[in-house]
Amino acid sequence: KNEVEQSPQNLTAQEGEFITINCSYSVGISALHWLQQHPGGGIVSLFMLSSGKKKHGRLIATINIQEKHSSLHITASHPRDSAVYICAVRSGGKTSYDKVIFGPGTSLSVIP
Amino acid sequence: DTEVTQTPKHLVMGMTNKKSLKCEQHMGHRAMYWYKQKAKKPPELMFVYSYEKLSINESVPSRFSPECPNSSLLNLHLHALQPEDSALYLCASSQEPGTGGLGYTEAFFGQGTRLTVV
């Protein structure tokens, strides 16, 4: 079993739909990143979370440390949201060697 | 300026060639990273530079040689690569270094260099 898992693996949505991408992990973490990668290759950091919830525009990210689970929500989805969304966790803590573990990614396609 | 700039965007090289990838950031970040990404896979950490010193080498073959000439610039020198080294090479930076990649603060990524070894 991978230490970081995402679901769904692939997602197709109609423009305007509310989208949820899930990330679950099995290690202790100090932070979790949500990243967006467009087909061209460049990666954009969307959120870094260690607790609670963050919102930026139409994007909302939540994390439940006890449940070892995070969700990325996209409201009023748009074709330009089509990308691969990657969850990455930082295991360990600031005083010890830590490691970043990437999830496998969720490929999102939003159809007009 | 919140950009990480990578050049070139595309590179085709023969197995006997020597080439270099370049990454530049002017955000005053103290940590810079090289990642390798194969198609449909997540990025794999290769090297971490913290305050211009190499802090992590994830057992990368010596045909990849990183260099950090100053706090804004990171190079990856390539020599005698194999076709299986063809991939997207991503550079990233973050304000505060972390030992395992991505740092303790938000990470900024470049657009990547798509490398093909023939």
Image (cartoon, rainbow, N blue to C red):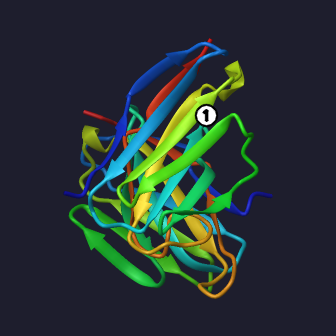
Q: In this view, does B44 lie above or below B48?
A: above
Chain ID for label 1? Answer: B
Q: Whole-percent x and y of residue A94?
A: 59, 85
User: Is residue A26 shown left or right of residue B112?
Assistant: right
What's under tag 1, amino acid-wise? Lys
Q: Among all residues in the image, which is located at the extreme front? A: B69
Q: Which residue is drawn at 37% across and 33% down?
A: B7
Q: Which residue is drawn at 38% across and 80% down?
A: A53
Q: Quadrant of the C terminus of chain A?
A: top left
Q: Residues within 10 Å of mark 1 (few under 14, many from 20)?
A: some
Give residue A59's quadrant in the image: bottom left
Q: Whole-percent x and y of residue A13?
A: 37, 42
User: Is residue A80 shown left or right of residue B107?
Assistant: left
How many numbered marks does the figure carry?
1
User: Is residue B67 shown left or right of residue B112?
Assistant: right
Q: Mark 1 points at which residue?
A: B38
Residue A2 visible within the image: yes
Give residue A110's quadrant in the image: top left
Name the residue nearer the viewer: A85 or A73: A85
Give residue B55's quadrant in the image: bottom right
Q: Among all residues in the image, which is located at the extreme right? A: A1
Q: Which residue is drawn at 51% across and 16% down?
A: B12
Q: In which quarter of the image is the N terminus of chain A?
A: bottom right
Name the residue nearer the viewer: B103 or B52: B52
Residue B39 visible within the image: no
Q: Residue at x 46, y 85 (%)?
A: A51
Name the residue nearer the viewer: A90 or B11: B11
Q: Whole-percent x and y of residue A107?
A: 49, 41
Q: Whole-percent x and y of residue B35?
A: 56, 47
SS at mark 1 in the image: loop
